[in-house]
Amino acid sequence: MINRYKTIAKEGTSLFKDRGSKFLGFAYPVDSEHSIKERLDQLRKSYHDARHHCYAYVLEPDGRLFRANDDGEPVNSAGKPILAQIEGRSLKNVLVVVVRYFGGTLLGVGGLIQAYRKAASEAIEKGEIITKHIHIKCRLWFEYHSMDAVMRIIREHRLKQWDQQFELSCSLMVRIRKEDADSVIRKLKLADCRIEILGTG
């Protein structure tokens, strides 16, 4: 069971040069294919005069969603070396893009692989690698007379809460660390709390 994963905390950038070509590396924390598209669109606008925008990403804590794109470079000379840098560090929810400005000298497939690998690696290193806990998002329902018991459990486990509605019947949203979920949910049920699990995040 996967309870934690490694990612990057903030954007990392790098610049690598080889025989006149410039390779700008960008590493981003991402959480969806939509956020990946936004980042790519933004870079294509900012560096619209660049020859290539090659990238790779890995999504989900188990890494089941991933992709590598050569964007017109020879097959497997750009996207695959970028992806190898992400996978080599066991990172998840990460997008790495390398923008290339062609310098007039052909680097050959071996030179391209080395350049994209180097630019990707340096961008990731600048992004600060961290470990994140997987959380389960839940909606809790309980009667007003159970509020003290429910809130005591929330405080004890330092659960993040939001969207509270406190009336005769109460509800709120919480995030529970996946590794703690079974025991916390058991305690909440003993406090006469109904729980709807809404997913992970």
Image: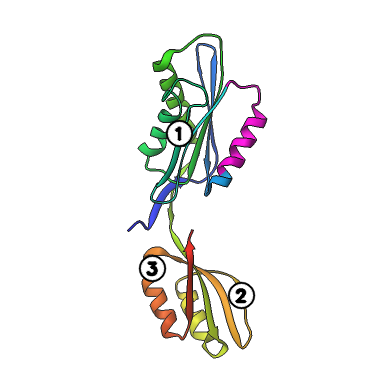
Split into 4 quadrants, where in the image is the N terminus? bottom left
The mark found on residue 180 in the picture is 3
Query: How far is the residue under mark 1 from the one under mark 2?
Result: 42 Å
Q: Is residue 40 left or right of residue 185?
A: right
N-terminal label among 1 and 3? 1
Q: Residue furthest left?
A: 1
Pick the front one: 132 or 102: 102
Q: Residue at x 58, y 82 (%)?
A: 170
Pick the front one: 11 or 99: 99
Quarter location, residue 102: top right
The number of numbered badges drawn on the structure is 3
Query: How far is the residue under mark 3 from the one under mark 2?
Result: 22 Å
The mark found on residue 164 in the picture is 2
Question: What SS does tag 3 mark?
Answer: helix
Horizontal and vertical percent position of residue 111: 42, 16
Q: Amino acid at mark 1?
A: Ala
Neighbor class of circle 3 (other Cα within 10 Å; few <14, some 14-19, many 20+) is: few
Question: Magenta-highlighted stretch: main secondary structure?
Answer: helix
Q: Residue at x 53, y 80 (%)?
A: 141
Residue behind mark 1? 68
Part of the protein shown in magenta: 36-51
The mark found on residue 81 in the picture is none
Q: Residue furthest bottom?
A: 145
Question: What SS does tag 1 mark?
Answer: strand
